Protein backbone atom coordinates (compact mmCIF):
# COMPACT_ATOMS: atom_id res chain seq x y z
CA UNK A 1 0.00 0.00 0.00
CA UNK A 2 1.66 3.30 -0.94
CA UNK A 3 1.98 5.68 1.98
CA UNK A 4 2.68 9.38 1.96
CA UNK A 5 6.05 9.89 3.62
CA UNK A 6 6.52 13.51 2.60
CA UNK A 7 3.70 15.20 4.46
CA UNK A 8 3.03 15.37 8.17
CA UNK A 9 -0.52 14.18 8.36
CA UNK A 10 -3.00 14.51 11.12
CA UNK A 11 -4.38 11.46 12.91
CA UNK A 12 -5.22 8.59 10.55
CA UNK A 13 -8.78 8.37 11.76
CA UNK A 14 -10.24 11.37 9.96
CA UNK A 15 -13.51 10.63 8.20
CA UNK A 16 -15.75 12.51 5.90
CA UNK A 17 -18.69 14.04 7.81
CA UNK A 18 -21.07 12.72 5.17
CA UNK A 19 -20.83 9.32 6.88
CA UNK A 20 -22.50 10.73 9.97
CA UNK A 21 -25.54 12.12 8.20
CA UNK A 22 -28.83 11.27 9.86
CA UNK A 23 -30.74 11.28 6.56
CA UNK A 24 -31.41 7.89 5.02
CA UNK A 25 -29.24 7.22 1.94
CA UNK A 26 -30.41 8.94 -1.19
CA UNK A 27 -32.58 6.74 -3.35
CA UNK A 28 -33.00 8.11 -6.83
CA UNK A 29 -36.26 7.33 -8.63
CA UNK A 30 -35.90 4.91 -11.48
CA UNK A 31 -38.69 6.34 -13.58
CA UNK A 32 -39.44 9.77 -14.81
CA UNK A 33 -37.02 12.50 -15.71
CA UNK A 34 -33.60 12.60 -14.17
CA UNK A 35 -32.49 15.02 -11.50
CA UNK A 36 -31.14 17.57 -13.95
CA UNK A 37 -34.09 17.45 -16.32
CA UNK A 38 -32.64 15.14 -18.96
CA UNK A 39 -34.54 12.13 -20.30
CA UNK A 40 -33.96 8.45 -19.57
CA UNK A 41 -33.46 5.89 -22.35
CA UNK A 42 -32.58 8.62 -24.81
CA UNK A 43 -29.22 9.79 -25.99
CA UNK A 44 -29.34 12.94 -23.90
CA UNK A 45 -25.76 13.96 -23.22
CA UNK A 46 -24.93 17.04 -21.23
CA UNK A 47 -23.96 20.07 -23.31
CA UNK A 48 -20.19 20.41 -23.35
CA UNK A 49 -17.95 23.43 -23.36
CA UNK A 50 -14.52 22.78 -24.87
CA UNK A 51 -11.61 25.05 -25.45
CA UNK A 52 -8.14 24.25 -26.78
CA UNK A 53 -4.84 25.93 -26.20
CA UNK A 54 -5.33 27.13 -22.65
CA UNK A 55 -1.95 26.13 -21.21
CA UNK A 56 0.78 28.20 -22.85
CA UNK A 57 3.67 25.98 -21.78
CA UNK A 58 2.25 22.75 -23.14
CA UNK A 59 2.56 21.70 -26.75
CA UNK A 60 -1.19 21.11 -26.79
CA UNK A 61 -3.92 21.40 -24.22
CA UNK A 62 -7.66 21.19 -23.88
CA UNK A 63 -10.30 21.91 -21.26
CA UNK A 64 -13.71 20.32 -21.17
CA UNK A 65 -16.75 21.04 -19.04
CA UNK A 66 -19.85 18.87 -19.12
CA UNK A 67 -22.41 19.78 -16.52
CA UNK A 68 -20.25 20.07 -13.41
CA UNK A 69 -17.51 17.71 -14.58
CA UNK A 70 -14.40 19.74 -15.33
CA UNK A 71 -11.18 18.33 -16.69
CA UNK A 72 -8.11 19.58 -18.38
CA UNK A 73 -5.47 17.79 -20.39
CA UNK A 74 -1.96 18.73 -21.46
CA UNK A 75 0.17 17.05 -24.08
CA UNK A 76 3.94 17.25 -24.18
CA UNK A 77 5.95 15.85 -27.04
CA UNK A 78 7.17 14.33 -29.18
CA UNK A 79 10.25 14.29 -26.99
CA UNK A 80 13.35 12.16 -27.15
CA UNK A 81 12.98 9.02 -25.12
CA UNK A 82 15.75 7.72 -22.85
CA UNK A 83 15.11 4.00 -23.12
CA UNK A 84 16.59 2.58 -26.26
CA UNK A 85 14.69 -0.71 -26.52
CA UNK A 86 14.28 -2.18 -29.91
CA UNK A 87 10.58 -1.35 -29.94
CA UNK A 88 11.30 2.33 -29.56
CA UNK A 89 13.32 2.38 -32.73
CA UNK A 90 10.31 1.65 -34.90
CA UNK A 91 7.50 3.61 -33.32
CA UNK A 92 6.90 6.13 -30.63
CA UNK A 93 5.60 5.60 -27.17
CA UNK A 94 2.50 7.12 -25.64
CA UNK A 95 2.36 7.61 -21.87
CA UNK A 96 -0.85 8.62 -20.20
CA UNK A 97 -1.48 9.77 -16.70
CA UNK A 98 -4.83 10.58 -15.19
CA UNK A 99 -5.09 12.16 -11.78
CA UNK A 100 -7.90 13.35 -9.61
CA UNK A 101 -7.47 16.51 -7.59
CA UNK A 102 -8.20 15.63 -3.94
CA UNK A 103 -11.07 18.12 -3.85
CA UNK A 104 -12.67 16.79 -7.02
CA UNK A 105 -14.92 14.17 -5.44
CA UNK A 106 -17.38 14.58 -2.56
CA UNK A 107 -15.03 12.51 -0.34
CA UNK A 108 -11.49 13.79 -0.21
CA UNK A 109 -9.06 11.71 -2.21
CA UNK A 110 -5.31 11.59 -1.72
CA UNK A 111 -2.50 12.94 -3.86
CA UNK A 112 -0.87 9.53 -4.06
CA UNK A 113 -2.12 7.65 -7.09
CA UNK A 114 -4.40 4.92 -5.91
CA UNK A 115 -5.10 1.81 -7.93
CA UNK A 116 -8.23 3.38 -9.37
CA UNK A 117 -6.21 6.23 -10.88
CA UNK A 118 -3.78 3.76 -12.41
CA UNK A 119 -6.70 1.83 -13.83
CA UNK A 120 -8.12 4.96 -15.46
CA UNK A 121 -4.69 5.85 -16.86
CA UNK A 122 -4.43 2.40 -18.40
CA UNK A 123 -7.91 2.66 -19.93
CA UNK A 124 -7.02 6.06 -21.35
CA UNK A 125 -3.85 4.63 -22.85
CA UNK A 126 -5.71 1.73 -24.46
CA UNK A 127 -8.32 4.08 -25.89
CA UNK A 128 -5.87 6.57 -27.37
CA UNK A 129 -3.24 4.23 -28.70
CA UNK A 130 -5.12 2.98 -31.79
CA UNK A 131 -5.80 6.53 -32.91
CA UNK A 132 -2.31 8.05 -32.75
CA UNK A 133 0.06 7.46 -35.69
CA UNK A 134 2.92 6.34 -33.46
CA UNK A 135 4.90 4.93 -36.38
CA UNK A 136 5.49 8.50 -37.53
CA UNK A 137 7.38 9.35 -34.34
CA UNK A 138 10.14 6.76 -33.93
CA UNK A 139 12.35 7.04 -30.88
CA UNK A 140 10.01 9.60 -29.32
CA UNK A 141 7.68 9.85 -26.42
CA UNK A 142 4.36 11.64 -26.24
CA UNK A 143 3.00 12.41 -22.77
CA UNK A 144 -0.64 12.96 -22.07
CA UNK A 145 -1.60 14.24 -18.61
CA UNK A 146 -5.21 14.57 -17.57
CA UNK A 147 -6.20 16.33 -14.39
CA UNK A 148 -9.76 16.03 -13.12
CA UNK A 149 -10.75 19.25 -11.39
CA UNK A 150 -14.28 18.29 -10.50
CA UNK A 151 -15.83 14.85 -10.76
CA UNK A 152 -19.50 15.01 -11.49
CA UNK A 153 -19.87 11.72 -13.30
CA UNK A 154 -18.70 10.17 -16.55
CA UNK A 155 -15.09 11.18 -15.97
CA UNK A 156 -13.33 8.60 -18.09
CA UNK A 157 -15.45 9.32 -21.16
CA UNK A 158 -14.78 13.04 -21.00
CA UNK A 159 -11.12 12.46 -20.25
CA UNK A 160 -10.80 10.45 -23.48
CA UNK A 161 -12.44 13.24 -25.49
CA UNK A 162 -10.32 15.91 -23.83
CA UNK A 163 -7.09 13.98 -24.34
CA UNK A 164 -7.73 13.43 -28.05
CA UNK A 165 -8.53 17.14 -28.46
CA UNK A 166 -5.30 18.06 -26.72
CA UNK A 167 -3.36 15.68 -28.97
CA UNK A 168 -4.93 17.30 -32.03
CA UNK A 169 -4.13 20.74 -30.64
CA UNK A 170 -0.51 19.67 -30.23
CA UNK A 171 -0.35 18.73 -33.87
CA UNK A 172 0.25 15.03 -33.22
CA UNK A 173 -0.84 13.03 -36.25
CA UNK A 174 -3.90 10.91 -35.60
CA UNK A 175 -6.19 8.70 -37.65
CA UNK A 176 -9.26 10.21 -36.07
CA UNK A 177 -10.50 11.94 -32.93
CA UNK A 178 -11.43 9.58 -30.10
CA UNK A 179 -14.67 10.39 -28.36
CA UNK A 180 -15.88 8.85 -25.14
CA UNK A 181 -19.38 8.23 -23.91
CA UNK A 182 -20.68 6.39 -20.91
CA UNK A 183 -24.01 5.10 -19.72
CA UNK A 184 -25.36 3.66 -16.51
CA UNK A 185 -27.82 0.81 -16.70
CA UNK A 186 -30.38 0.97 -13.95
CA UNK A 187 -32.87 -1.89 -13.98
CA UNK A 188 -34.69 -1.59 -17.26
CA UNK A 189 -33.74 1.95 -18.18
CA UNK A 190 -30.41 3.44 -19.06
CA UNK A 191 -29.13 6.93 -18.48
CA UNK A 192 -26.55 8.39 -20.83
CA UNK A 193 -23.71 10.55 -19.46
CA UNK A 194 -24.57 9.89 -15.80
CA UNK A 195 -23.86 12.42 -13.10
CA UNK A 196 -21.97 11.49 -9.91
CA UNK A 197 -25.18 10.77 -8.01
CA UNK A 198 -26.53 8.57 -10.79
CA UNK A 199 -23.25 6.65 -11.03
CA UNK A 200 -22.76 5.86 -7.39
CA UNK A 201 -26.15 5.51 -5.80
CA UNK A 202 -28.05 2.57 -7.22
CA UNK A 203 -31.64 3.59 -7.21
CA UNK A 204 -34.13 0.81 -7.73
CA UNK A 205 -34.20 -2.25 -5.57
CA UNK A 206 -34.24 -4.37 -8.71
CA UNK A 207 -31.25 -6.63 -8.69
CA UNK A 208 -31.08 -7.24 -12.42
CA UNK A 209 -29.02 -5.13 -14.74
CA UNK A 210 -27.16 -2.65 -12.61
CA UNK A 211 -23.95 -1.46 -14.16
CA UNK A 212 -21.97 1.13 -16.01
CA UNK A 213 -20.38 1.10 -19.44
CA UNK A 214 -17.82 3.42 -21.05
CA UNK A 215 -16.99 3.30 -24.76
CA UNK A 216 -14.25 5.13 -26.69
CA UNK A 217 -15.11 5.49 -30.36
CA UNK A 218 -13.47 6.74 -33.55
CA UNK A 219 -16.44 8.16 -35.49
CA UNK A 220 -15.19 8.44 -39.03
CA UNK A 221 -13.51 5.02 -38.98
CA UNK A 222 -16.36 3.34 -37.08
CA UNK A 223 -13.99 1.58 -34.70
CA UNK A 224 -14.21 1.08 -30.97
CA UNK A 225 -10.88 1.73 -29.33
CA UNK A 226 -11.87 1.32 -25.71
CA UNK A 227 -14.57 -0.54 -23.84
CA UNK A 228 -15.09 -1.06 -20.16
CA UNK A 229 -18.06 -2.22 -18.20
CA UNK A 230 -18.77 -3.33 -14.68
CA UNK A 231 -21.76 -4.29 -12.60
CA UNK A 232 -24.12 -7.00 -13.81
CA UNK A 233 -25.85 -6.90 -17.15
CA UNK A 234 -27.23 -9.38 -19.58
CA UNK A 235 -25.55 -9.61 -22.95
CA UNK A 236 -28.47 -7.97 -24.81
CA UNK A 237 -28.43 -4.98 -22.47
CA UNK A 238 -24.68 -4.70 -22.94
CA UNK A 239 -24.99 -4.73 -26.73
CA UNK A 240 -27.78 -2.15 -26.63
CA UNK A 241 -25.66 -0.04 -24.31
CA UNK A 242 -22.70 -0.10 -26.70
CA UNK A 243 -24.97 1.05 -29.52
CA UNK A 244 -26.31 3.88 -27.35
CA UNK A 245 -22.81 5.01 -26.50
CA UNK A 246 -21.85 5.04 -30.18
CA UNK A 247 -24.86 7.28 -30.88
CA UNK A 248 -23.79 9.56 -28.04
CA UNK A 249 -20.34 9.85 -29.60
CA UNK A 250 -21.83 10.78 -32.97
CA UNK A 251 -23.85 13.50 -31.26
CA UNK A 252 -20.74 14.96 -29.68
CA UNK A 253 -18.59 14.84 -32.82
CA UNK A 254 -19.66 18.10 -34.52
CA UNK A 255 -19.18 20.12 -31.33
CA UNK A 256 -15.62 18.85 -30.86
CA UNK A 257 -14.76 19.40 -34.51
CA UNK A 258 -16.02 22.98 -34.32
CA UNK A 259 -13.98 23.72 -31.21
CA UNK A 260 -10.85 22.34 -32.83
CA UNK A 261 -11.39 24.34 -36.03
CA UNK A 262 -11.91 27.49 -33.97
CA UNK A 263 -8.67 26.93 -32.09
CA UNK A 264 -6.71 26.36 -35.29
CA UNK A 265 -8.19 29.47 -36.87
CA UNK A 266 -7.30 31.55 -33.84
CA UNK A 267 -3.72 30.27 -33.78
CA UNK A 268 -3.13 30.83 -37.48
CA UNK A 269 -5.73 33.19 -38.90
CA UNK A 270 -6.45 32.60 -42.59
CA UNK A 271 -4.99 35.21 -44.94
CA UNK A 272 -7.51 37.99 -45.43
CA UNK A 273 -8.97 38.33 -48.88
CA UNK A 274 -7.82 41.55 -50.34
CA UNK B 1 3.11 -10.13 -20.10
CA UNK B 2 5.88 -12.38 -21.27
CA UNK B 3 6.28 -11.95 -24.98
CA UNK B 4 7.65 -14.14 -27.71
CA UNK B 5 9.09 -13.00 -30.98
CA UNK B 6 7.07 -14.26 -33.90
CA UNK B 7 8.31 -13.90 -37.47
CA UNK B 8 6.12 -12.56 -40.25
CA UNK B 9 5.88 -15.97 -41.92
CA UNK B 10 4.73 -17.58 -38.68
CA UNK B 11 2.13 -14.83 -38.22
CA UNK B 12 0.71 -15.49 -41.69
CA UNK B 13 0.65 -19.22 -40.97
CA UNK B 14 -1.25 -18.73 -37.71
CA UNK B 15 -3.64 -16.23 -39.32
CA UNK B 16 -4.53 -18.51 -42.22
CA UNK B 17 -5.00 -21.46 -39.89
CA UNK B 18 -7.38 -19.57 -37.63
CA UNK B 19 -9.31 -18.37 -40.66
CA UNK B 20 -10.02 -22.05 -41.38
CA UNK B 21 -10.85 -22.82 -37.71
CA UNK B 22 -7.65 -24.76 -37.15
CA UNK B 23 -5.08 -23.60 -34.66
CA UNK B 24 -1.43 -24.59 -34.45
CA UNK B 25 -2.01 -27.21 -31.74
CA UNK B 26 -5.11 -28.63 -33.46
CA UNK B 27 -7.80 -26.99 -31.33
CA UNK B 28 -10.86 -25.25 -32.68
CA UNK B 29 -11.30 -21.53 -32.17
CA UNK B 30 -13.38 -21.94 -29.02
CA UNK B 31 -11.53 -24.79 -27.30
CA UNK B 32 -9.52 -24.56 -24.14
CA UNK B 33 -6.24 -26.28 -23.52
CA UNK B 34 -5.87 -29.13 -21.06
CA UNK B 35 -6.77 -27.80 -17.62
CA UNK B 36 -5.82 -29.25 -14.25
CA UNK B 37 -7.31 -27.98 -11.01
CA UNK B 38 -6.33 -28.98 -7.54
CA UNK B 39 -7.66 -27.46 -4.33
CA UNK B 40 -6.35 -27.44 -0.78
CA UNK B 41 -2.71 -27.38 -1.79
CA UNK B 42 -1.43 -24.98 0.87
CA UNK B 43 -2.31 -25.97 4.41
CA UNK B 44 -1.72 -22.57 6.03
CA UNK B 45 -4.51 -20.90 4.10
CA UNK B 46 -8.24 -21.03 4.64
CA UNK B 47 -8.72 -21.99 1.00
CA UNK B 48 -6.36 -22.53 -1.88
CA UNK B 49 -6.31 -23.82 -5.43
CA UNK B 50 -3.82 -24.39 -8.18
CA UNK B 51 -4.80 -24.28 -11.84
CA UNK B 52 -2.61 -25.34 -14.74
CA UNK B 53 -3.91 -24.33 -18.17
CA UNK B 54 -1.52 -25.61 -20.80
CA UNK B 55 1.77 -24.15 -19.56
CA UNK B 56 0.20 -21.35 -17.50
CA UNK B 57 0.20 -22.12 -13.78
CA UNK B 58 -1.57 -20.02 -11.17
CA UNK B 59 -1.76 -20.53 -7.40
CA UNK B 60 -4.42 -18.78 -5.30
CA UNK B 61 -4.45 -18.64 -1.52
CA UNK B 62 -7.32 -17.18 0.48
CA UNK B 63 -6.98 -16.10 4.07
CA UNK B 64 -9.88 -14.87 6.16
CA UNK B 65 -9.10 -12.13 8.64
CA UNK B 66 -11.36 -10.30 11.04
CA UNK B 67 -11.49 -6.62 10.26
CA UNK B 68 -13.61 -3.52 10.40
CA UNK B 69 -16.31 -3.24 7.73
CA UNK B 70 -16.28 -0.40 5.23
CA UNK B 71 -18.04 2.73 6.55
CA UNK B 72 -20.67 2.88 3.80
CA UNK B 73 -21.68 -0.77 4.06
CA UNK B 74 -21.51 -1.73 7.75
CA UNK B 75 -23.26 -5.08 7.45
CA UNK B 76 -21.08 -6.61 4.74
CA UNK B 77 -17.62 -8.07 4.61
CA UNK B 78 -15.36 -7.58 1.61
CA UNK B 79 -12.70 -9.18 -0.57
CA UNK B 80 -9.25 -7.81 -1.25
CA UNK B 81 -7.35 -8.98 -4.31
CA UNK B 82 -3.65 -8.94 -4.89
CA UNK B 83 -1.85 -10.47 -7.84
CA UNK B 84 1.86 -11.12 -7.66
CA UNK B 85 3.81 -11.92 -10.79
CA UNK B 86 6.59 -14.13 -9.53
CA UNK B 87 10.03 -13.79 -11.04
CA UNK B 88 9.85 -17.55 -11.59
CA UNK B 89 7.47 -16.94 -14.47
CA UNK B 90 9.79 -14.86 -16.65
CA UNK B 91 12.88 -12.78 -15.93
CA UNK B 92 10.92 -9.69 -17.03
CA UNK B 93 9.08 -9.92 -13.71
CA UNK B 94 12.15 -9.55 -11.59
CA UNK B 95 12.03 -6.81 -8.98
CA UNK B 96 9.31 -4.32 -9.89
CA UNK B 97 8.89 -5.47 -13.47
CA UNK B 98 5.77 -7.47 -12.79
CA UNK B 99 4.10 -4.72 -10.75
CA UNK B 100 2.30 -3.10 -13.65
CA UNK B 101 0.83 -6.35 -14.85
CA UNK B 102 -0.10 -7.29 -11.28
CA UNK B 103 -1.94 -4.00 -10.73
CA UNK B 104 -3.83 -4.40 -14.01
CA UNK B 105 -4.92 -7.92 -13.06
CA UNK B 106 -5.95 -6.88 -9.53
CA UNK B 107 -7.97 -3.93 -10.79
CA UNK B 108 -9.83 -6.12 -13.25
CA UNK B 109 -10.60 -8.61 -10.47
CA UNK B 110 -12.04 -5.83 -8.32
CA UNK B 111 -14.32 -4.85 -11.20
CA UNK B 112 -15.39 -8.44 -11.84
CA UNK B 113 -16.49 -8.90 -8.23
CA UNK B 114 -17.97 -5.43 -7.86
CA UNK B 115 -21.62 -6.45 -7.78
CA UNK B 116 -24.14 -7.74 -5.29
CA UNK B 117 -24.43 -11.32 -6.40
CA UNK B 118 -21.01 -12.82 -7.02
CA UNK B 119 -20.15 -13.43 -3.40
CA UNK B 120 -22.69 -13.12 -0.60
CA UNK B 121 -20.96 -10.38 1.37
CA UNK B 122 -23.68 -10.24 4.02
CA UNK B 123 -22.72 -13.74 5.18
CA UNK B 124 -19.25 -12.38 5.94
CA UNK B 125 -20.59 -10.00 8.56
CA UNK B 126 -19.92 -10.84 12.22
CA UNK B 127 -21.10 -7.78 14.06
CA UNK B 128 -22.57 -4.94 11.95
CA UNK B 129 -20.40 -1.86 12.02
CA UNK B 130 -17.68 -3.45 14.12
CA UNK B 131 -16.40 -6.78 12.85
CA UNK B 132 -16.57 -8.59 9.61
CA UNK B 133 -14.63 -11.20 7.67
CA UNK B 134 -12.17 -9.81 5.15
CA UNK B 135 -11.12 -12.38 2.55
CA UNK B 136 -7.64 -11.68 1.24
CA UNK B 137 -7.38 -13.37 -2.14
CA UNK B 138 -3.72 -13.60 -3.12
CA UNK B 139 -2.85 -14.82 -6.59
CA UNK B 140 0.60 -16.00 -7.50
CA UNK B 141 1.61 -16.46 -11.13
CA UNK B 142 3.99 -19.38 -11.37
CA UNK B 143 4.21 -19.82 -15.11
CA UNK B 144 3.09 -17.55 -17.89
CA UNK B 145 1.94 -18.97 -21.21
CA UNK B 146 -0.89 -16.68 -22.20
CA UNK B 147 -4.46 -16.43 -21.01
CA UNK B 148 -3.79 -15.31 -17.47
CA UNK B 149 -7.26 -13.89 -16.81
CA UNK B 150 -9.05 -17.17 -17.45
CA UNK B 151 -6.68 -19.23 -15.33
CA UNK B 152 -6.85 -16.72 -12.47
CA UNK B 153 -10.64 -16.56 -12.44
CA UNK B 154 -11.00 -20.35 -12.45
CA UNK B 155 -8.45 -20.63 -9.65
CA UNK B 156 -10.28 -18.01 -7.60
CA UNK B 157 -13.58 -19.82 -8.05
CA UNK B 158 -11.98 -23.13 -6.99
CA UNK B 159 -10.26 -21.53 -4.01
CA UNK B 160 -13.46 -19.81 -2.85
CA UNK B 161 -15.24 -23.17 -3.11
CA UNK B 162 -12.51 -24.67 -0.96
CA UNK B 163 -12.50 -21.85 1.64
CA UNK B 164 -13.46 -22.84 5.15
CA UNK B 165 -14.21 -19.85 7.36
CA UNK B 166 -14.25 -20.70 11.07
CA UNK B 167 -17.46 -20.03 12.96
CA UNK B 168 -17.32 -17.28 15.55
CA UNK B 169 -19.45 -16.48 18.54
CA UNK B 170 -19.92 -12.99 19.89
CA UNK B 171 -20.29 -12.73 23.63
CA UNK B 172 -20.59 -9.62 25.78
CA UNK B 173 -18.39 -9.42 28.84
CA UNK B 174 -19.04 -7.48 32.08
CA UNK B 175 -18.24 -3.98 30.84
CA UNK B 176 -20.40 -4.41 27.76
CA UNK B 177 -17.47 -4.91 25.41
CA UNK B 178 -17.81 -7.55 22.75
CA UNK B 179 -15.61 -10.61 22.70
CA UNK B 180 -15.14 -12.87 19.75
CA UNK B 181 -14.65 -16.56 20.34
CA UNK B 182 -13.52 -18.96 17.70
CA UNK B 183 -14.98 -22.40 17.97
CA UNK B 184 -12.50 -25.07 19.10
CA UNK B 185 -13.48 -27.64 16.55
CA UNK B 186 -11.32 -27.10 13.42
CA UNK B 187 -14.02 -28.68 11.25
CA UNK B 188 -16.79 -26.34 12.44
CA UNK B 189 -16.69 -23.88 9.61
CA UNK B 190 -18.77 -21.94 7.15
CA UNK B 191 -18.50 -22.51 3.41
CA UNK B 192 -19.18 -19.97 0.71
CA UNK B 193 -21.72 -20.37 -2.05
CA UNK B 194 -19.74 -19.99 -5.25
CA UNK B 195 -22.60 -20.59 -7.71
CA UNK B 196 -22.63 -16.99 -8.84
CA UNK B 197 -18.88 -16.42 -8.98
CA UNK B 198 -18.08 -15.41 -12.56
CA UNK B 199 -15.41 -16.82 -14.84
CA UNK B 200 -13.41 -14.65 -17.18
CA UNK B 201 -13.11 -15.52 -20.86
CA UNK B 202 -10.47 -13.81 -22.98
CA UNK B 203 -11.14 -13.58 -26.70
CA UNK B 204 -8.30 -12.46 -28.95
CA UNK B 205 -9.06 -10.97 -32.32
CA UNK B 206 -6.78 -12.65 -34.86
CA UNK B 207 -7.45 -11.57 -38.44
CA UNK B 208 -11.21 -11.61 -38.88
CA UNK B 209 -11.93 -14.29 -36.32
CA UNK B 210 -11.59 -14.55 -32.60
CA UNK B 211 -9.96 -17.29 -30.52
CA UNK B 212 -10.48 -18.38 -26.95
CA UNK B 213 -7.49 -19.30 -24.76
CA UNK B 214 -4.77 -17.88 -26.96
CA UNK B 215 -1.18 -19.00 -26.53
CA UNK B 216 1.59 -16.44 -26.52
CA UNK B 217 2.24 -16.94 -30.24
CA UNK B 218 -1.40 -16.32 -31.10
CA UNK B 219 -1.44 -13.27 -28.86
CA UNK B 220 1.53 -11.85 -30.76
CA UNK B 221 -0.57 -12.01 -33.95
CA UNK B 222 -3.58 -10.24 -32.50
CA UNK B 223 -4.02 -6.52 -32.10
CA UNK B 224 -6.77 -6.44 -29.52
CA UNK B 225 -8.57 -8.74 -27.11
CA UNK B 226 -11.83 -8.58 -25.22
CA UNK B 227 -12.08 -9.81 -21.66
CA UNK B 228 -15.58 -10.75 -20.60
CA UNK B 229 -16.59 -12.18 -17.24
CA UNK B 230 -19.69 -14.37 -17.26
CA UNK B 231 -21.70 -16.03 -14.50
CA UNK B 232 -23.39 -19.40 -14.82
CA UNK B 233 -26.68 -17.71 -15.69
CA UNK B 234 -25.11 -15.79 -18.55
CA UNK B 235 -24.98 -12.37 -16.86
CA UNK B 236 -21.97 -10.32 -17.81
CA UNK B 237 -20.25 -8.71 -14.86
CA UNK B 238 -17.31 -7.03 -16.50
CA UNK B 239 -16.00 -6.43 -19.99
CA UNK B 240 -12.85 -4.73 -21.01
CA UNK B 241 -10.95 -4.27 -24.20
CA UNK B 242 -7.18 -4.71 -23.87
CA UNK B 243 -4.43 -4.23 -26.37
CA UNK B 244 -3.28 -1.42 -28.57
CA UNK B 245 -5.64 -1.94 -31.50
CA UNK B 246 -9.22 -0.96 -32.20
CA UNK B 247 -12.21 -3.20 -32.85
CA UNK B 248 -15.23 -2.95 -35.09
CA UNK B 249 -18.54 -2.66 -33.21
CA UNK B 250 -19.77 -5.76 -35.07
CA UNK B 251 -16.73 -7.75 -33.90
CA UNK B 252 -17.38 -6.67 -30.35
CA UNK B 253 -20.97 -7.89 -30.52
CA UNK B 254 -19.83 -11.19 -32.03
CA UNK B 255 -17.11 -11.63 -29.43
CA UNK B 256 -19.48 -10.80 -26.57
CA UNK B 257 -21.90 -13.43 -27.75
CA UNK B 258 -19.17 -16.04 -28.17
CA UNK B 259 -17.70 -15.15 -24.80
CA UNK B 260 -21.04 -15.50 -23.11
CA UNK B 261 -21.58 -18.90 -24.73
CA UNK B 262 -18.14 -20.22 -23.81
CA UNK B 263 -18.27 -18.78 -20.29
CA UNK B 264 -21.68 -20.20 -19.56
CA UNK B 265 -20.54 -23.64 -20.69
CA UNK B 266 -17.50 -23.48 -18.43
CA UNK B 267 -19.32 -23.37 -15.10
CA UNK B 268 -21.18 -26.68 -15.04
CA UNK B 269 -18.14 -28.96 -15.65
CA UNK B 270 -16.07 -26.86 -13.24
CA UNK B 271 -18.56 -27.25 -10.39
CA UNK B 272 -18.85 -30.96 -11.11
CA UNK B 273 -15.09 -31.45 -10.93
CA UNK B 274 -14.83 -29.43 -7.72
CA UNK B 275 -17.64 -31.35 -6.07
CA UNK B 276 -16.13 -34.68 -7.13
CA UNK B 277 -12.81 -33.69 -5.61
CA UNK B 278 -14.55 -32.65 -2.41
CA UNK B 279 -16.32 -36.01 -2.12
CA UNK B 280 -13.08 -37.92 -2.38
CA UNK B 281 -12.08 -36.29 0.91
CA UNK B 282 -9.21 -38.19 2.51
CA UNK B 283 -8.92 -40.59 -0.41
CA UNK B 284 -7.91 -37.74 -2.72
CA UNK B 285 -4.57 -38.24 -4.43
CA UNK B 286 -2.45 -35.22 -3.84
CA UNK B 287 -0.61 -34.26 -7.01
CA UNK B 288 1.11 -31.21 -5.63
CA UNK B 289 3.54 -29.17 -7.62
CA UNK B 290 5.69 -31.79 -9.29
CA UNK B 291 2.99 -33.98 -10.85
Image (cartoon, coloured by chain):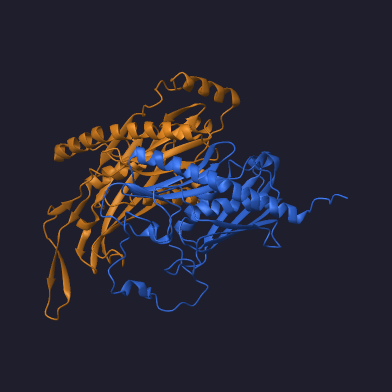
Above/below status of A224 relative to B69: above
Determine whether, in the image, residue A230 is placed left or right of residue B125. Answer: right
Above/below status of A71 relative to B32: below
- Name the colour assigned to chain A in the rendering: blue
Pick the residue in front: B71 or A64. A64
Single out the residue that lies furthest toward the top: B20
Single out the residue that lies furthest toward the right: A274
- Name the colour assigned to chain B in the rendering: orange
Q: Is residue B7 visible?
A: yes
Question: Residue B217's x, y, as percent?
Answer: 50, 30
What residue is rendered at 38% in x and 41% in y? A238
Pick the residue in front: A116 or B284. A116
Determine whether, in the image, residue B90 is placed left or right of residue A254. Answer: left
Q: Is residue B112 visible?
A: no
Question: Residue B100's x, y, as percent?
Answer: 49, 50
Above/below status of A167 relative to B55: below
What residue is rendered at 22% in x and 49% in y? B163
Question: Residue B177's x, y, as percent?
Answer: 17, 77
Question: Residue A185's x, y, as percent?
Answer: 36, 49
Location of the N terminus of chain A by quadrant is bottom left
Determine whether, in the image, residue A25 is placed left or right of residue A176. Answer: left
The total of numbered circles placed on residues is 0
Q: Quadrant of residue A250?
A: top right
Q: Quadrant of residue B133?
A: bottom left
Amino acid sequence: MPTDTKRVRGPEVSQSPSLLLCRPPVVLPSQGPRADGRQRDQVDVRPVFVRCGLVSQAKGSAYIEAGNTKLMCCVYGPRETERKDETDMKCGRLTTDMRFAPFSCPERGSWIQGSQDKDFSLMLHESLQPAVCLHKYPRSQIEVNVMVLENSGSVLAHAITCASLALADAGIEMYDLVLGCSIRQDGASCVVDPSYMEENYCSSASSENQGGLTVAFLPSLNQISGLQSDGEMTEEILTAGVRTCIEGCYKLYPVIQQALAKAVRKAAPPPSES
Amino acid sequence: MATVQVSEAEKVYILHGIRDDLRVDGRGCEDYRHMEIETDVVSNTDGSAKVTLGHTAVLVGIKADIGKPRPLVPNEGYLEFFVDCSANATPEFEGRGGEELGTELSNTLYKVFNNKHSVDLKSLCICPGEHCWVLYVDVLLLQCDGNLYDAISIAIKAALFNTKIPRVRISTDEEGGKEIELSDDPYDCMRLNVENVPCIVTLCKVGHRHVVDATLQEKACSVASLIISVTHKGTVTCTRKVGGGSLDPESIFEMTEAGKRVGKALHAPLMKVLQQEEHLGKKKQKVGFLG
